[in-house]
């Protein structure tokens, strides 16, 4: 074999090796990078799918309880309607009157006012403790201790409040109901009114024994309503109405 042929064979082999190496670098290596990126993306997608499956499961559970939640919401809307809803309240009074035999003589409803949370009140001071602190026989150390106790904050058992209930979304409607009937009928009317659909707070009851054994009663109290704008809620639809006697 001539030398020139061997050189050509060697050059050809080198060119083939170079082509194979170039193919690996230019073709295979990028594909390996694509495969690695795809594997990373697959892991991310699998994690997202797991989160979606969890959310879907939670939504299915909530959907299964939808009827129960809607029932609870309907009961709350009866107790706290969006507005005075005087017609429904009068219908409730008529129903209770028919069931108990107590006759509703009049219903006076005041305009709605924005709700104001009750303020907490501090406990009254103990007169005995004040007398002891003012005693001239107390030593300086006892006086200093008493002064420190007086300066310390006093825990108060104030009324429960909820920050979600504000003057902008909750209103109070004061009302007065006059009843007649015997004592048992009037008391049963009050009980059913407090246990009825509409949330009501009875703040005062006046019972008067009439001649002939009858009883007349005046109930003072508050009903409540939800409203986006408290000033827009008015009681005009209920103020001019009087329930029919049962």
Image (spheres, rainbow, N blue to C red):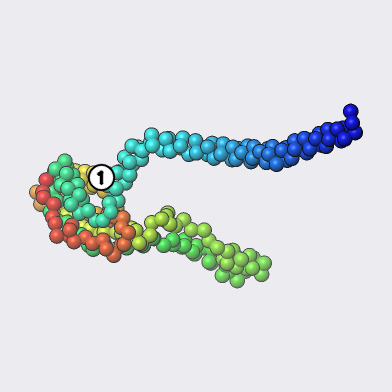
Element type where label 1 sits in the image = loop
Q: Residue furthest left?
A: 212
* Residue at point 20%, 54% (across, down): 86
Q: Residues within 10 Å of mark 1 (few under 14, many from 20)?
A: some
* Residue at point 17%, 58% (across, down): 237
* Whether residue 158 is situated above or below residue 194 in the rendered picture: below
* Whether residue 61 is situated above or below residue 154 in the rendered picture: above
Residue 88: where, in percent of width, then height?
A: 20, 49
* Residue at point 28%, 54% (across, down): 82
Q: In this view, does 81 lie to the left or right of 163?
A: left
Residue 111: where, in percent of width, then height?
A: 23, 63
Residue 103: where, in percent of width, then height?
A: 13, 48
Viewer-side residue, 158 vs 13: 13
Viewer-side residue, 157 vs 134: 157
* Whether residue 208 is situated above or below residue 14 in the rendered picture: below
Q: In this view, does 217 lie to the left or right of 132?
A: left
Q: Which residue lies furthest to the bottom in this view?
A: 136
User: Which residue is label 1 attached to?
Assistant: 196
The quarter in which the C terminus is drawn is top left
Residue 66: where, in percent of width, then height?
A: 36, 38
Viewer-side residue, 21 vs 53: 21
The quarter in which the N terminus is drawn is top right
**Figure label count:** 1
Where is residue 206, by image quadrant? bottom left
């Amino acid at each position: 074999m001539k030398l020139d042929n061997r050189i050509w064979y060697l050059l050809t082999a080198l060119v083939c090796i170079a082509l194979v190496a170039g193919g690996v670098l230019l073709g295979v290596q990028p594909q390996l990078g694509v495969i690695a990126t795809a594997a990373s993306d697959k892991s991310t997608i699998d994690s997202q799918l797991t989160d979606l499956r969890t959310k879907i499961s939670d939504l299915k559970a909530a959907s299964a309880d939808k009827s129960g939640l809607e029932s609870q919401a309907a009961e709350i809307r009866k107790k706290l309607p969006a507005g005075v809803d005087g017609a429904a309240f009068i219908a409730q009074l008529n129903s209770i009157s028919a069931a108990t035999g107590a006759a509703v003589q009049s219903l006076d409803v005041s305009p709605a006012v924005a709700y104001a949370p009750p303020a907490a009140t501090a406990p009254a001071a103990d007169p005995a403790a004040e007398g002891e602190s003012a005693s001239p026989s107390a030593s300086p150390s006892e006086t200093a201790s008493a002064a420190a106790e007086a300066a310390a904050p006093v825990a108060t058992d104030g009324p429960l409040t909820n920050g979600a209930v504000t003057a902008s979304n909750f209103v109070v409607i004061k009302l007065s109901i006059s009843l007649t009937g015997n004592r048992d009928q009037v008391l049963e009317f009050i009980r059913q009114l407090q246990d009825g659909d509409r949330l009501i707070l009875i703040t005062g009851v006046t019972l008067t024994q009439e001649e002939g054994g009858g009883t007349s009663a005046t109930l003072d109290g508050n009903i409540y309503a939800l409203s986006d704008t408290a000033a827009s809620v008015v009681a005009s639809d209920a103020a001019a109405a009087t329930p029919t006697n049962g």
